């Protein structure tokens, strides 16, 4: 049995319990195919890039196996650790992958060799300014890297692989506890907090939990040099229990929030949990894109002001979406509230899915919602298409570790039964209160709204099926379903095996922005099920510029298909060419001519002819 | 006679000739009062800050008069030079200012003492890494600082003050020519180009002009390390004669363009001039805010993509607006086309005027068009109000030098007569083709559209009065005026003295954005004359949030006044509170209640109770 990512202890506050990773198998279907693509394409590609782009070479320089000066980002060790974590999760599902096992074992041996006698391990600091250990935590990412090593070790321990990685990580964790148990310090980039709690969950060693809590409570006390972007960028402007708004660097904020929930549920800390709830309301009430992306500013990779959500300059870092998914999962486990699963779904099917090309080896780091006509995509900060790698390569291995552990996020149990949160073709074989349960899920979700669950178990059990927030209603076995707290709950005697059919309505819809989102005023987005759609230049008639297209929000929206795109949406609009070349005319009287508009799922954009794209479409003014 | 900034030689291509600074006096009126505020408040304040903030101290460290390590930005010498330039222009108008003269003389002596034997001068490089002179030009700003010293010397030479400054600058300029006359190198931050041309104009020394041209022609040839933001950020991606779009860091781009025009007019280089025209069309056709601000991105202080003009994240650096003003002035002199004067006026009365508080000692660096409710103004990158100084203090002394030389930009002459471009109460005493002309201008512009010009001269002369692009028509002496190429041209016998009255229509108007400016779709701005208006939270009824306000674009707009605000604009709108708290609802049915809206001139925002502000107002949806 392989426990998955985030596995609260038996005494933790946890409305729902995660299923062991090995209890869920995703078969042919959207999520299963994606997970397989990760296993056969993206993960091996990341492993190869660790050598090609140099992250592994730095560790070999520490051991003397390689020459030359440190290269790559100063926190590139974390690329190695995230890839290790991905490999461990993957081996939990496919233990016979010899190449992956070799990668884990040889990397574990390398880490053991590189590790200092006292347990210290950070290739940048060991090769560059070795006398400055732990002295520049506002930017050194030493504890951040340590956290990712620990998370790799947690995955390895749960998957029963890479014993050497676990040993190395524990020695480093022990050093962290020894070094920071009495010294007041925090890291500029959170990650160590959630990692230490997970290590506590694996080992039962309470000092890890205590240290995580200590790192949380020392935040906001001026221990960090705010440097260029100020303390709010580092979430160090106020104590974590007092904050009311998400601030600064999005990934840092969200990793910190994951750690806050982890500590809160393990220590029954209501105050800390209340802070997480406040920040969730702020983040998802005023600072999240319709694709689930977060981070409105390229300058400091930051949340912006409330409702500051420019589609063309959306930063929406891939890592931030992964962090949001992981934070929401923790909130879902703690509370059982479906809104967290809704946000996991929104991010997964839109921004996270869109971050990777269909070939599995090209990625977006920032995830725009509008690629302008005339866009200068020469810089990797905002490229015109997915790139094979990045100078800061945090995202691809982060995707790999998420996808390798994806089956762990689909379902949960509680004393009453089994809950399905993410719909995917697959099988579940688990126990609920000691009773064996076997479920088979058949669905073509998200392309189709029908989810068929065949369930067998010897004791009465409630099967809870999530009805997403975007669905106004649902059918159960063909009849209108009663939805309780966001779930259709089916309590039955399943001993002879029984099948239930959930139908979610897949009628295409238009989505409107909150009136305070100035940047997309007068626009609508198209959506169907969990998928947000986008217009691409490639689907427009020749001579029509994407920016001149307007949509008729009252027109019918008709599903169709294109090669490699199972469901397109077609509707009517106009082409409104500006009557004046003036930038600020006193009158604008555009001329409109009808045009048929075909939208594709946002996540598939940029996989055909490269060109402009937009999610938010201005409505006709005529 | 003190020539003003930008004084083409007699053989330069120049449709219009600038007037000597000393020929124009601004008296009581908008521009005259502003210039006086600069002289008595802002400029002395800048002089004081050179000591208080440490820029001058670095130079004293070079001479051994001060201890300690270099502090401040590595290009802080330029703050000293821009303040020196401002002082020189100011002494051209008020030569009896003893304190200012002392500042110029003591600083000149300090520079002479700090200057190396070979002419080199840069306090950062001399104190830090002295062996790295000229080796890191992509970011060292050594030639940029040299350029500002040269511009200070040009002002000193024209004003007949600060002989030592002139000597120091010439020695440095000679070193630059010696060092870079055969070595291929350019500076990451343009400025040296326009400075060398101006020094050539003062001295007649042709190698300065040749070197300026050489620096231009070496751009775009890969000589610079693109570093973090790439070569387009530094305008080094393509040769200057081939570029078709403005790119990258706005101030760098605009200073480079000033140098391009300077070289083009002095060397009769049509190709270079054509490139400047292309970039002008691009900058003012697709990348300029309604306030005249430029620069849509905080990340790299850059022009964005075409039509990427977010009001809330407008960068709109004050220095960029000053650079735009100076570039447009060069284009105006070269061509005589009024569109350049229109852009000077737009920038001057809106973004440049707004950059400084009424107290003359608080400044904006970035100039937003929308301060959101809930804005986090804790960082000086986007503060909620004007700040007394900045860690990068380029803007305040730049304002000081512009304002001290402002009278040089109001009028021009050509063989046929006198042209007035910027309307301001004042007097002009000059010669046109050797004939003395005296003009007195009486006006309360921009509050009032009446401009009365009393003119006396012995020969027939054409008085040309600019009719701004925002004015649909004009009256001359009460009758509809014929407007030729943007000017009302009055040719008369003025020998007995004559008075003409121009009336520009000051009816309030709504301005619309080009349909491709997505960020302000469905909004209008209010304007009157050259002034753009803004709504401030301070003028809204209690309980009404600025973001909920909508304007009725068909309603009457009525001028009024408030304390310290000569002309307000009042009109009708609604308060539309969102019916749903959802960030992405499928329906939005706002409820509207009527509200009276009072707008104030944009440039005056933030001078009363601090709070949210917006230029672009969404129109009612009801």
Image (spheres, coloured by chain):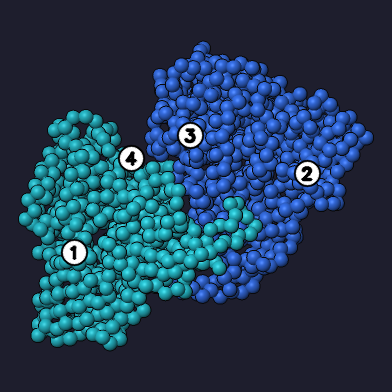
Chain colours: A cyan, B blue
Up-down: is B578 above or below B38? below
The lab-note entry on whether marks 4 and 1 share a chain reads: yes
Q: Chain of mark 4?
A: A
The numbered mark at residue B242 is 3
The location of residue A497, given as percent across then percent down, is: 11, 83
The lab-note entry on whether marks 3 and 1 share a chain reads: no
Tag 4 residue: A136
Local packing at callout 1 (Cα closer than 10 Å; few below 14, some 14-19, many 20+) is: some
Q: Chain of mark 1?
A: A
Local packing at callout 2 (Cα closer than 10 Å; few below 14, some 14-19, many 20+) is: many
Which badge, 4 or 1, comes first in the chain's sequence? 1
Which element carries disc 2, helix, strand or loop? strand
Residue at coordinates 9% horizontally, 49% vertically from top-left? A99
Local packing at callout 4 (Cα closer than 10 Å; few below 14, some 14-19, many 20+) is: some
Distance Cα–Cα, label 2 vs label 1: 74 Å
On-image quarter of the N terminus of chain A:
bottom left
The numbered mark at residue B488 is 2
Of B111 and B159, which appears nearest the observer?
B159
Distance Cα–Cα, label 2 vs label 4: 66 Å
Observer-side mark, 4 or 1, equals 1
Local packing at callout 3 (Cα closer than 10 Å; few below 14, some 14-19, many 20+) is: few
Tag 1 residue: A32
Which residue extends farthest right? B496
Q: Chain of mark 2?
A: B
Observer-side mark, 3 or 1, equals 3
User: Mark 2 and 1 residues: CB-CB less than 8 Å, in contact?
Assistant: no
Observer-side mark, 4 or 3, equals 3
């Amino acid at each position: 049995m392989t426990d998955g990512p985030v596995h609260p202890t038996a005494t933790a506050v946890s409305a729902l319990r995660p299923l062991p990773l090995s209890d869920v198998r995703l078969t042919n279907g959207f999520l299963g195919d994606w997970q397989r693509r990760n296993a056969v394409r993206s993960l091996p590609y990341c492993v190869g890039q660790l050598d090609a782009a140099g992250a592994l070479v730095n560790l070999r320089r520490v051991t003397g196996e390689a020459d030359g000066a440190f290269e790559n980002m100063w926190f590139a060790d974390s690329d190695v650790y995230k890839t290790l974590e991905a490999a461990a999760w993957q081996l939990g599902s496919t233990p016979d992958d010899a190449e992956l096992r070799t990668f884990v074992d040889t990397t574990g041996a390398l880490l053991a060799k590189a590790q200092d006698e006292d347990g210290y391990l950070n290739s940048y600091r060991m090769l560059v300014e070795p006398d400055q250990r732990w002295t520049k935590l506002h930017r050194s990412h030493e504890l951040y890297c340590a956290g990712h090593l620990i998370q790799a070790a947690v995955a390895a321990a749960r998957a029963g692989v890479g014993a050497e990685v676990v040993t190395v990580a524990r020695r480093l964790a022990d050093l962290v506890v020894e070094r920071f148990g009495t010294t007041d310090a925090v890291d500029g980039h959170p990650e160590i907090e959630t990692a230490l709690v997970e290590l506590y969950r694996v080992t039962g060693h309470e000092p890890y939990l205590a240290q995580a809590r200590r790192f949380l409570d020392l935040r906001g006390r001026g221990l960090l040099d705010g440097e260029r972007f100020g303390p709010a960028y580092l979430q160090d402007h106020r104590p974590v229990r007092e904050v009311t708004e998400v601030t600064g660097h999005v990934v840092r904020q969200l990793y910190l929030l994951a750690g806050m929930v982890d500590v809160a549920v393990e220590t029954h800390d209501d105050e800390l949990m209340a802070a997480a709830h406040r920040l969730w309301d702020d983040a998802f009430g005023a600072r999240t894109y319709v694709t689930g992306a977060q981070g409105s500013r390229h300058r400091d990779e930051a949340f912006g002001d409330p409702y500051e959500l420019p589609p063309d300059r959306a930063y929406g870092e891939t890592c931030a979406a992964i962090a949001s998914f992981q934070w929401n999962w923790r909130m879902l486990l703690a509370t059982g509230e479906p809104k967290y699963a809704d946000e996991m779904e929104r991010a997964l099917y839109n921004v996270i899915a869109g971050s990777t090309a269909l070939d599995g080896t090209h990625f977006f780091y920032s995830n725009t919602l509008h690629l302008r006509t005339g866009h200068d995509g020469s810089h990797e900060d905002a490229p015109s298409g997915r790139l094979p790698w990045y100078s800061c390569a945090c995202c691809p291995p982060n995707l790999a570790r998420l996808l390798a552990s994806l089956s762990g996020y689909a379902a949960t149990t509680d004393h009453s039964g089994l809950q399905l949160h993410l719909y995917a073709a697959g099988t579940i074989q688990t126990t609920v209160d000691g009773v064996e349960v076997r479920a088979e899920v058949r669905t073509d979700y998200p392309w189709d709204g029908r989810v068929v669950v065949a369930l067998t178990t010897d004791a009465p059990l409630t099967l809870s099926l999530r009805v997403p927030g975007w669905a106004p209603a649902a059918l159960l076995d063909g009849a209108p379903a009663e939805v309780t707290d966001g779930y259709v709950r089916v309590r039955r005697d399943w001993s002879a095996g029984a099948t239930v059919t959930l139908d979610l309505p897949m009628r295409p819809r238009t989505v409107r922005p909150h009136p305070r989102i100035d940047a997309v005023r007068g626009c609508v987005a198209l959506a169907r099920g969990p998928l947000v759609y986008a217009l691409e230049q490639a689907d427009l008639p020749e001579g029509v510029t994407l920016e001149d297209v307007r949509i008729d929000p009252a027109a019918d929206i008709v599903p169709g298909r294109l090669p490699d795109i199972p469901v397109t949406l077609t509707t009517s609009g106009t082409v409104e060419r500006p009557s004046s070349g003036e930038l600020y005319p006193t009158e604008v009287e555009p001329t409109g001519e009808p045009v048929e508009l075909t939208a594709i799922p946002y996540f598939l954009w940029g996989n055909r002819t490269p060109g402009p794209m937009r999610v938010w479409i201005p409505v006709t003014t005529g």
